[in-house]
């Protein structure tokens, strides 16, 4: 592939770096990889997408992409001679759960000074690397894997200085040390989580998935036939749920034609909504879908204030909350909307209509 503005989407996607970049674009726009394989899309040239991508990621995006592709080989370079084995493939590891390993002060809890005192023993065993399970500040509701502060050590295990001394002693013996860093989630006592809980639309709001209420089950397919499937719904406010046996529902439908007609009408409406959502997801960008949705909600409520969280909006659009948060932030910076906790205010309806393609 010649990396220039005339390269097609298919050619860029065949390049390892190009594929990675396009996959990330698809994720942010709420599309799947099947979109790239569509002949109408795969044959588009980068120069034809300059304006579209520039509006999404800033001017000069296509030129930057071309430069990156030109600097990155399409296949990794061949290495002459044997490949040196990495140290960890031959090393002997020793995992330690500090709380139960060695107690230095008699309080019944293992600690870092206790591990330090055991280093000669571990060295005699021929250990090359120590792997410590979480030692960071935590309420310990999940065995230390719920971290409240990544920059401090649990008080019962010691201090940052104790950790520094342990690392230095390991290095003096030619041993390495690995810390178990839990980056997938935090404790509910972490400042980021507290901030997100206080302001879901704030700086840390999209760091977490915040959900209220219980999960309920709905099976409208029982109206139609013996088809069965599991469907989950989430209540966004206090809700009463009535559950009835499928056979009882079918008996009622068979005995009362008016109820059956209303049930079928309900199912048709729901199926139409689903088909419309699928069509939007397949053929309309997330930005355009959001603009359309905000205008539709504004018309439905007869006002410029839309009381929905980013999570609820994402569910309506069939995309990720992170995508909605990014788009609303972009809309806000451009003066189209203004956000507050659990609410979106439309400021520039004309510009929003333009984004919606209306």
Image (cartoon, helix red, strand yellow):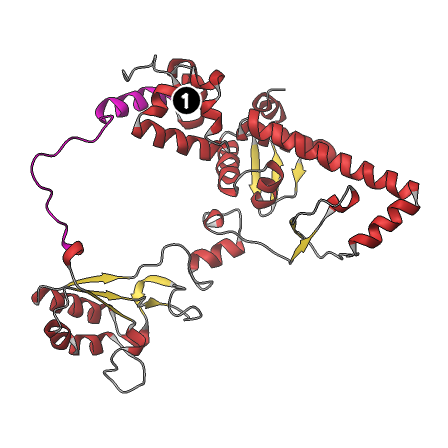
Q: 18 or 356, which is in the foreground? A: 18
Quarter location, residue 178 = bottom left
Q: Which residue is drawn at 32% across and 24% down?
A: 65
Rendering coords of residue 137 (x, y %): 35, 68
The magenta-colored residue range is: 59-87
Rendering coords of residue 347 (x, y %): 60, 31
Looking at the image, can residue 185 be seen? yes
Rendering coords of residue 243 (x, y %): 77, 57
**The C terminus: image quadrant:** top right
**The N terminus: image quadrant:** top left
Q: Residue at x 46, y 34 (%)?
A: 28
Q: Residue at x 22, y 25 (%)?
A: 71
Secondary structure under the numbered disc 1 in the rendered image: helix
Verify whether residue 230 appears in magenta.
no
Q: Is residue 335 left or right of residue 46?
A: right
Q: Residue at x 24, y 65 (%)?
A: 131
Q: Is residue 110 left or right of residue 334?
A: left
Q: 194 or 76, which is in the foreground? A: 76
Residue identifier under label 1: 54
Q: Residues within 10 Å of mark 1 (few under 14, many from 20)?
A: some
Q: Is residue 295 above or below residue 96?
A: above
Looking at the image, can residue 291 be seen? no
Q: Residue furthest front?
A: 226
Q: Is residue 284 left or right of residue 235?
A: left
Rendering coords of residue 107 (x, y %): 31, 86
Q: 181 or 193, which is in the foreground? A: 181
Q: In this view, does 257 lie above or below 281?
A: below
Q: In this view, does 11 lie above or below 112?
A: above
Q: Which residue lies furthest to the bottom in this view?
A: 106
């Amino acid at each position: 592939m010649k990396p220039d503005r005339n390269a097609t989407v298919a050619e860029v996607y065949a390049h390892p770096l190009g594929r990675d970049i396009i996959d990330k674009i698809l994720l942010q726009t709420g599309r799947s990889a099947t979109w790239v394989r569509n002949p109408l899309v795969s044959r588009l040239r980068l120069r034809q997408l300059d304006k579209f991508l520039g509006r999404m990621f800033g001017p000069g995006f296509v030129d930057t992409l071309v430069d990156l592709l030109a600097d990155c080989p399409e296949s990794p370079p061949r290495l002459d001679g044997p490949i040196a084995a990495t140290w960890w493939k031959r090393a002997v590891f020793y995992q330690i759960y500090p709380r139960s390993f060695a107690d230095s002060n008699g309080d019944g809890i293992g600690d870092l000074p206790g591990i330090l005192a055991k280093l000669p023993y571990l060295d005699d065993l021929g250990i090359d690397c120590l792997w410590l399970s979480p030692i960071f500040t935590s309420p310990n509701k999940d065995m230390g894997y719920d971290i409240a502060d990544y920059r401090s050590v649990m008080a019962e295990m010691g201090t940052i200085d104790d950790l520094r001394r342990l690392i230095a002693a390991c290095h003096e013996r030619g041993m390495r040390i690995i810390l178990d860093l839990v980056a997938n989630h935090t404790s509910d006592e972490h400042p980021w989580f507290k901030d997100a809980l206080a302001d879901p639309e704030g700086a840390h709001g999209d760091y977490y998935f915040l959900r209220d209420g219980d999960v309920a089950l709905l099976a409208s397919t029982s109206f139609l036939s013996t088809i069965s499937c599991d469907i989950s719904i989430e209540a966004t406010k206090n809700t009463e749920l009535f559950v009835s046996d499928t056979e009882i529902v079918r008996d009622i439908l068979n005995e009362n034609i008016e109820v059956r007609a209303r049930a079928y009408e309900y199912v048709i409406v729901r199926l139409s909504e689903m088909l419309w959502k699928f069509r939007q997801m397949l053929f309309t960008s997330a930005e355009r879908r959001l603009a359309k949705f905000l205008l539709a909600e504004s018309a439905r409520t007869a006002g410029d204030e839309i009381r929905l969280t980013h999570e609820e909006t994402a569910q309506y659009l069939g995309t990720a909350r992170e995508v909605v948060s990014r788009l609303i932030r972009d809309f806000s910076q451009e003066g189209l909307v203004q956000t507050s906790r659990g609410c979106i205010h439309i400021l520039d309806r004309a510009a929003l209509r333009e984004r919606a393609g209306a």
